[in-house]
Amino acid sequence: MQTKQRKLTIGVLYFTIALFTIYIFIMFLLNGVEWAPMVKGKMKNPDFSLATWKLFFYPHIFLGTIALAIGPFQLTKISRRKPKLHKMLGKIYAVAIFINILVVPYISLSATGGRGTMIAFLILNALWLWTTAMGVIKATQRKISAHKEWILRSYAITWVFVTFRIFVIPFSLFLDSSLAFPIAVYLGIAMNLLFVEWRKRKNKKLTTGRKIASPNPVI
């Protein structure tokens, strides 16, 4: 049952990532980033440099997509059965995030919605650094259980890359961007992290239940 649920979860994740990648390609690459609605707003600012912004934005979306794509595969049996592959992909995931963390502050300076959005993105960036760094540290310490927990939290923050863009659309219909964008960021962080913590507790209960139901109980 759990195997079917895991496969379904991974399938849903990859389907969503595929849709998101298509959206990113059409919105920012096929049509040209300068035609994206949020970029048009930035270009009204005389101090905004589109050429410089592109140098930071393109690595941001490219590395973010790589991190998104690696995450679900690391949950599969194929990855767990091949520790070298798991370790290599884990390194790519961490490096993609650590480089991304360096480019986010500049992008945040011209974030749609002003200072409130900038602060929200910087908080998101700090959480990204914290959770990913803790996952890497626990891995080097061979604390596998703690490593898994922190990397799942890191991936929850990575997933804000997607959920933010889902939430911001309806909020933008009835709220000013100065409110819609920060709310979408904070809501994405909260929901993603709460989901990971809920799944962790649920899995612990299932594990405990299997131990109690063991055919050879220790008396």
Image (cartoon, helix red, strand yellow):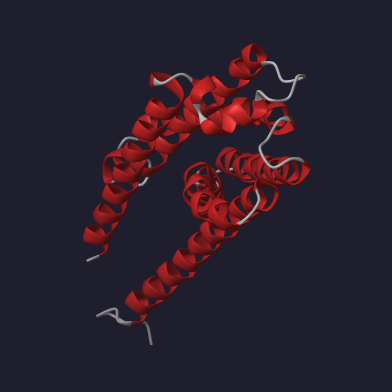
Residue that appears at 37% across and 33% down: 21
Q: Is residue 191 visible?
A: yes
Q: How many marks?
A: 0
Residue 49 percent location from the top left of the image:
69, 16
Horizontally, residue 161 falls left or right of residue 105, namely left
Residue 79 appears in which quarter of the rendering?
top left
Quadrant (top left, top right, bottom left, bottom right) of the N terminus: bottom left
Quadrant (top left, top right, bottom left, bottom right) of the C terminus: bottom left
Q: Is residue 94 visible?
A: no
- Judge by depth and name the residue closer to the eye, 1 or 22: 22
Residue 206 appears in which quarter of the rendering?
bottom left
Residue that appears at 63% across and 31% down: 41
- In this view, which residue lies farthest toward the bottom? 219
Horizontally, residue 122 falls left or right of residue 215, namely right
Residue 193 percent location from the top left of the image:
55, 58
Residue 65 percent location from the top left of the image:
44, 32
- In this view, which residue lies farthest toward the top? 51
Residue that appears at 58% across and 44% down: 135
Residue 177 percent location from the top left of the image:
65, 47
Q: Is residue 157 above or below residue 216?
A: above
Residue that appears at 44% across and 38% down: 68
